[in-house]
Amino acid sequence: MLQYVSIALSQTNCFLLKIKEGYLLIDCGNKSDAYTLVKAIHNQGITLKDINYLLLTHHHSDHCGLLTFLVNENPNMKVIMSDKCAEYLKAGVNFKDENEKYSSALLRLILGIYFKFNGKITDRFEPYSSRAKDRIIKSDDDTILPKLGIEGKVLLTPGHTADSISVIAEDIAFVGDAARNMLNFFGASYKPLLISELESCNSSLKKILESGASTICPAHGKPFSADRLKAIKL
């Protein structure tokens, strides 16, 4: 049975999975989340040295902000990411697609007001160049997780960003920002807050559903039943 814990950081949920040897961490929050993340890991009775793999669902600063910190603390940690993510990380700033837009007009209005009065979330992070030991995903991969002792696969799930990937571990989908469970009453329930390409977004959600996952664990909001995704228009 899959063993994992959710770690709530300032903006992002990260997930720590027990693997055959050590742990796999999915996403790592903002640069300002270092204390919270390290404390949460220590609360599990382990240290950063026990995390053998870090998987990035995509390159945004609230998902990769502590990447260089973690690799500096544990040089043996291997990073799993898409090939597009590896390219975006070199720039040290969120890539903004020219077609990117909020999934609903009401969300755009509400979040516009929020950012106006609370300041803009930083879109910058320390640049990172992939190393020989890192694992770069160019297509759906069903070999990585079994080697780590987990029944599952890594899927390309673009739509929120072009570099997004999701982890299907047994019957649980860790989807990063490919789906959400927050602000659903402002429209486009469960879809990403920001969408770079709508058709790709819908195709990725269908792919996640077809994977057999029964529970969706998003980076923003609480886990929810895959049945809720089935009920929305894709």
Image: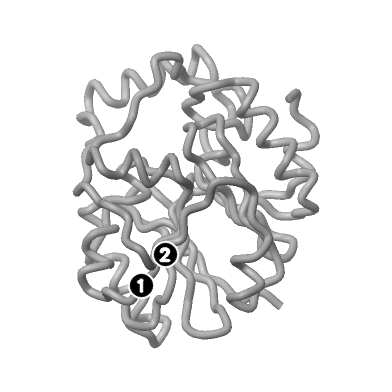
Identified at 24% across, 21% down, the residue is 116
**230 vs 212, nearest the viewer:** 212
* Contact check, label 2 and label 1, Cβ < 8 Å: yes
Identify the amino acid type marked 2: Leu
Residue 156 in the image, given as x and y percentages of width and height: 59, 43
Whichever of callouts 2 and 1 sits on the residue coming sooner in the sequence is 2
For residue 77, the mark is 1
The picture quadrant where one finds residue 25 is bottom left
Q: Which quarter shows the N terminus?
A: bottom right
Q: Is residue 13 visible?
A: no
**214 vs 21, nearest the viewer:** 21
106 shown above or below 183: above
Identified at 29% across, 72% down, the residue is 38
Residue 216 in the image, given as x and y percentages of width and height: 65, 51
Tell me the crowding category of disc 1: few under 14, some 14 to 19, or many 20 or more residues within 10 angstroms, Cα based.
many
For residue 54, the mark is 2
Identified at 22% across, 45% down, the residue is 125
Residue 10 in the image, given as x and y percentages of width and height: 32, 51
Identify the amino acid type marked 1: Met
The picture quadrant where one finds residue 145 is bottom right
